[in-house]
Image (cartoon, grey):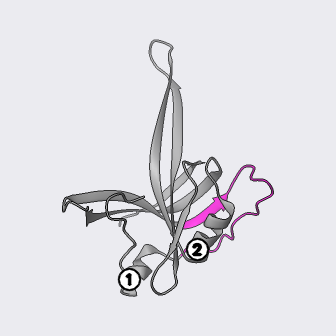
Amino acid sequence: MSVNKVILIGNLGKDPEVRFTANGRAVGRFPIATSEVWTDANGTRQERTEWHNIVVWGKQAESCGQYLAKGRQVFVEGSIRTRSYDDKTGNKRYVTEIVAQRIRFLGGGGGARAAAESPAEPYGDAAAAGEPPPVDDDVPF
């Protein structure tokens, strides 16, 4: 048995970028930051921030583009995927992403409504439909 499940609560590092595939399916991308704080052995407060690249498909991607903005807190549930691509100079690059199945909007947001909790379209459906995932030439975001 194996499990590939990720649950994150963090803040958007920038506004979501929403694009559409040739077939008209929405795909959204945005980074979120999660932070942990602890006190080390010397009594000094320490903080570490991790950045996570989020990918969301379909109607949820459209909702994210409409209602989310930099700094907004979100709950993300999904799975980890690593993919590779060739940059403009022909070098192979690797990117690890969280493919979201569920996103909930948290915290304040100027009256923005919460996203529907229906599952997002998984990344695998795009590949099964013959659509490669959208890739920027040099930077995955």
Identify the residue shown where x is 73% and y is 63%: 114
Q: Which mark is residue 119?
A: 2
Q: Which mark is residue 131?
A: 1
- The image shows residue 17 at horizontal and vertical percentages of 53, 63
Identify the residue shown where x is 67% and y is 66%: 66
Q: Secondary structure at mark 1?
A: loop
Task: Characterize the magenta stretch by its predominant secondary structure.
Answer: loop
Residue sitting at the far left: 90
- The image shows residue 95 at horizontal and vertical percentages of 33, 58
* Camera-side residue of 128 and 39: 128
- Alpha-carbon span between mark 2 and mark 1: 20 Å
Q: Secondary structure at mark 2?
A: loop
Mark closer to the chain start, 2 or 1: 2
Report the span colored magenta: 101-120
- The image shows residue 44 at horizontal and vertical percentages of 50, 16
Q: Quadrant of residue 75?
A: bottom right
The amino acid on which the numbered mark 2 sits, given as a three-letter code, is: Pro
115 in magenta: yes
36 w.r.t. 112: above or below: above
**Residue 55 located left or right of residue 73:** left
**Residue 41 located left or right of residue 86:** right
